Amino acid sequence: MAKFNDSLQHFLFEDMINQPMPIRGNIVHLNHTFRQVLKHQNLPQVLKQALGDLMTASVLLSSTLKMQGVMVLQLQSKGALKLLVVECRSDLKLRATAKWDVDWFEAQATQLQNISFAELLEQGQFVITLDPTEGEPYQGIVPIEGNTIAEMLQNYMMRSQQIDTSLWLHCDGENAAGMLLQKLPNVAEYDPSLEDFDAWNRVNHLANTLTNQELQNLAPASLLTRLFAEEDIRLFEAKPTQFYCSCSKTKVGGMLRMLGVDEVNSILTEQGHIDVNCDFCNKHYAFDAVDATALFASDPVVNLSKSTH
Ligand SMILES: [Zn+2]
C-alpha cells in the first residue's frame, strides 16, 4: 500500500507567503477509510463516487478551518438522491451515509450513464454544519449550484464565504482523492495594490492539467512537482485519515427519549422490542421493555429542565 494512502497533506507556495493573498492547498487520499464507509451500505456506483467526492471535499475543506470539532456536509434533495451526509472531525475521523430512491435506481439502472449528477438532486440544497468543541455551532443552508460536487462546493465557498477555492475530486468507486487550492488573505491588512493577481490564475491553469490517474496514483510530492515545477512549494507532514463512527447505545437511547415515553411504549407493545440500526456503521442496537424503563427512569426532572435550554 502506498504511503500516501489514507492521508492528508498541506502545502503552500513559498514565494507567496509574504504576499497579501498567499495560496495554499491540500491533497487527500481516502482508500481504506472510504472502503470502510462503503462496507455498511450497498450503494449504486454513481452514489459511491458522489459519496467519495463529498468525503474528500469534507477533509479538504475542514482542514482549511482552524476549528477543533466536527464539520458535517449534506446534500439534500427531493430527487432520486435523497441525502448524502459526511461527517469529518478535525482529527480526520470520518463517517458518511446516503439515502436514495432504491426503486428509481433499479428502474433506471441501464439509463444511469445518460443522467447527470445534478438531475438526481431535484430542488437540492447544500447544508454545512460546524460544531466546534468550544463555541457556538454554525449552520449554512444554500441551494445547490453546479453540476458536480466540486463545482457545488466551489460556488458555496465563493458566494457564501467569499473565499476563492478550487477543488479537483476523483473517485473510482473504491478510492477517492482530491486537491484543493485556496487564496486567503494574510492576517495583516489586505492591500489589493500589492496582490499578484496572476498567481491565482497561473496555479489554477497548471492544476487544471492534472489527470484523474495522477491525482489517484501520484504521491503528493511528485504530484506537486509535476504540476508546479517552477514554484517553490513547502509540503507539510502527512496526517492520517480514518473511518470512525461515534454511535453508542447511550446516544440511541437519547434519541428514543426524544420520541417520548408514550411512543416508545407503543412500539414495545406492538413489537416487543425496539431495533435501531446505525445509518453510518450499521451497528444494531436493541431495546426491550427493561431497557426502556431504565431509559426513562434515569431521566430525573432536574436533568430534563437542564437539557431544554
Ligand atoms: Zn454507528
Image (cartoon, rainbow, N blue to C red):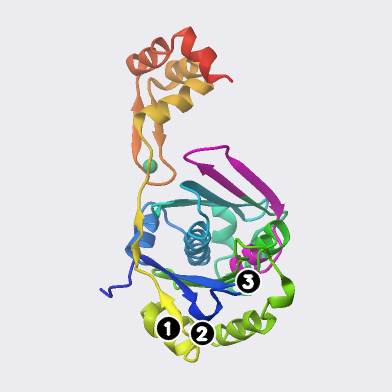
What residue occupies the far bottom of the structure in this picture?
Answer: 230
Q: Which residue is mark 1?
A: 223
Judging from the image, what secondary structure is the residue with disc 3 in? loop
Residue 257 lies within the magenta run: no
- Residue 290, above or below 82: above
Task: State how far apart marks 1 and 2 are (Cα).
Answer: 8 Å
Q: Specify the amino acid type for callout 2.
A: Leu
Report the image quarter containing ligand 1.
Answer: top left
Where, by quadrant of the figure, is residue 277 drawn?
A: top left
Q: Nearer the viewer, residue 210 or 67?
A: 67
Which amino acid lies under the numbered mark 3 shown in the image of this protein? Met
Question: Which amino acid type corresponds to the residue marked 1 in the rendered image?
Answer: Leu
The quadrant where residue 286 appears = top left
Element type where label 1 sits in the image: helix
**From which residue to which does the magenta span run?**
128-154
Q: How many marks?
A: 3
Q: Nearer the viewer, residue 139 or 268?
A: 139
Rendered location of residue 285, percent (x, y): 35, 32
Distance between the Cα atoms at labels 2 and 3? 23 Å
Q: Nearer the viewer, mark 2 or mark 3?
A: 3
- Marks 3 and 2: in contact by CB < 8 Å? no
Image marks 1 and 2: residues in contact by CB distance under 8 Å? yes
Ranked by sequence position, the earlier of labels 2 and 3 is: 3
Instruction: Quickly name the residue at label 3.
Output: 21
